[in-house]
Image: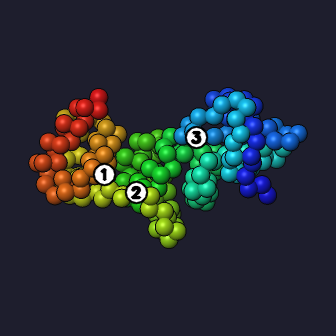
Amino acid sequence: MFDSIRGTVAAIENDEWILETDWYGFRIKVTPFISSGKIEEQKKLFIRFYFREDGEFFYYGFEDPKERETFDLICGVKGIGHKTAFKILSRIHWKEFTDLIIAENVDYLSSRINLSSKTVKRLLLELKPRLDKVGFVTTDAPKVTKTWKEVKTALSGLGYTAGEVEGVLNILWQEDQALFDDTEILLKKALGKIGGLK
């Protein structure tokens, strides 16, 4: 089984790169989060491939082994195939995805990957124990506290979307976790921050 490919970037077509190595050109699907490639540039990608009964191959390329490991873990969830796993990692960076799974942030994750809350809960149920076991904590993951929920309700009542609310709360958590000790202070900070992000 191939583990990685190093070759020359021959073409870039939306979410696919053609990587030439020796006498072969491999068409490889990559996520939007891959670092920008240039024609004739040398690149190494960690890969996974699947094939259908009709002989068609699907190659997926990842710059970071952890991204590929995340892809493998998602593929291992019941009812989630390689195409859906790739779509998920094309909508959200693998680090943010694993952080949100660990934080059990179902609502925001649902809005980011555009899947039903039922599917996201299944992802969380099966992935969180595995991520905890292999030490996948990539940042200080936010905790959904009572204060978090109260501010989220208040901001939603003001007309902000779930994605906007969850996004700004995630940013504030990374900036200063002490804010989450007081609902009034957190709400004021969130209003100031969310206004600046528009």
Q: Earlier in the sequence, mark 2 or mark 1?
A: 2
Q: Position of residue 162 (x, y in %)?
A: 32, 40
Q: Are marks 1 and 3 in contact (CB under 8 Å)?
A: no
Secondary element under disc 3, as helix, strand or loop, is: loop
Residue assigned mark 3: 34
Quadrant (top left/top right/bottom left/bottom right) for the N terminus: bottom right
Q: Are marks 2 and 1 in contact (CB under 8 Å)?
A: yes
Q: Earlier in the sequence, mark 1 or mark 3?
A: 3
| Snapshot quadrant of residue 89 | top right
Location of residue 119 with respect to 164 vertically, above or below: below
Left or right, residue 35 beside residue 118? right
Residue located at (68% from left, 47% from top): 45
Q: Is residue 44 left or right of residue 99?
A: right
What is the secondary structure assignment of the residue under circle 2? loop
Look at mark 2 in the image and give the residue it sits on: 139
Identity of the residue furthest to the right in this view: 23
Q: CA distance from mark 3 to mark 2?
A: 20 Å
Give how far across and how far down residue 142 sits, in percent: 32, 56
Picture coordinates of residue 165, whole percent (x, y):
28, 41
Name which residue type carries label 2.
Thr
How many labels were placed on the picture? 3
Q: Earlier in the sequence, mark 3 or mark 2?
A: 3
Q: What's the residue type where badge 1 is placed?
A: Gln
Q: CA distance from mark 1 to mark 3?
A: 24 Å
Please provide percent x and percent y for residue 34. Answer: 58, 40
Residue farthest along the front direction in this orientation: 41
Closer to the camera in the image, 117 or 4: 4
Q: Please tell me the numbered disc located at residue 174.
A: 1
The C terminus sits in image quarter:
top left
Residue located at (61% from left, 56% from top): 65
